[in-house]
Amino acid sequence: MQENFTLKNGKTVLIRDIVSDDYEAMQIYLQKLATETIFTNQYVGRKPRSKESFDKQCENPYSWSVGIFDGDRILGACQCFIYHPEHLWCGYTAQFGIHMLEEVQSSGLGMHLMTLMERWCLAQGMERIEASVRTQNRKAISLYLKCGYEIEGLSKRKALINGVWHDEYRIAKLLNNVKG
Ligand SMILES: CC(C)(COP(=O)(O)OP(=O)(O)OC[C@H]1O[C@@H](n2cnc3c(N)ncnc32)[C@H](O)[C@@H]1OP(=O)(O)O)[C@@H](O)C(=O)NCCC(=O)NCCS
């Protein structure tokens, strides 16, 4: 997929699939993201994933990986994958992650990427989309609730960040896509 998106400040960014050639740009992006937020799992000094693993994800038909681009620069990403794609009983759940740099936040991109991601999940025959979100992440929680997600539970002490324990909500949306 490939499309333009205009931010509130008038700047246009490109939303497109992340491909193997984006590996270096992705590492630079993740390092910057790590300096801006504690609400993802990126931290300063985290070992980058291997090129092999990155390529595998790009080629995985059960995974959807879309980036926000300004030229060659990555400004954000939304990734979703199907847990057990060929499992007769459990193959109806997808899990996602979404993040972007401060410079493009609060411009409607989050909402738009969530819509695109849900469309992909529906086309894949998914029934359930789920994720975790740190309980202090008001912006993301607000986005997910607006997109129809529900808080299903609380996972205590999921992350120890700078000496402080953080809890996470488990959130999910049922798509009513598959006949039971
Ligand atoms: C959380 C995140 C994905 C939201 O994306 P976004 O593009 O900033 O959000 P949007 O502009 O699409 O706004 C969607 C909703 O989020 C909420 N939101 C956006 N900006 C907000 C702000 N500054 N304060 C509070 N809520 C805010 C609002 O409910 C908003 O709906 P509205 O525009 O109808 O009021 C993005 O801010 C981000 O990447 N944050 C850092 C990383 C992160 O927290 N990732 C999620 C990990 S679970």
Image (spheres, rainbow, N blue to C red):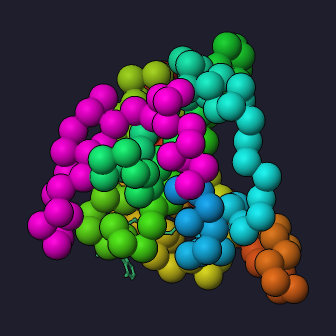
Give x and y (percent) for residue 118.
40, 40
Residue pictured at 56% horizontal, 19% vertical:
59
**Left or right for 39, reference 167:** left
Give x and y (percent) for residue 82.
61, 29
Image quadrant holding the C terminus, namely top right
Which residue is more in the foreground, 27 or 14? 27
Residue pictured at 42% horizontal, 73% vertical:
102
Q: Residue furthest left?
A: 10
Image quadrant holding the N terminus, namely top left
Residue pictured at 21% horizontal, 38% vertical:
3
View quadrant of ligand 1: bottom left
Which residue is more in the foreground, 148 or 166? 166
Residue pictured at 62% horizontal, 25% vertical:
55
| Numbered label tally | 0
**Left or right for 149, reference 162:** left
Give x and y (percent) for residue 21.
49, 30
Is residue 4 at least partly visible in the picture?
A: yes
Is residue 128 at least partly visible in the picture?
A: no
Q: In which quarter of the image is residue 84?
A: top right
Magenta-colored stretch includes residue 7: yes
Magenta-colored stretch includes residue 15: yes
Image height of 98 relative to 54, above or below = below
Per the rendered image, the range of residues in magenta is 1-28
Give x and y (percent) for residue 74.
43, 51
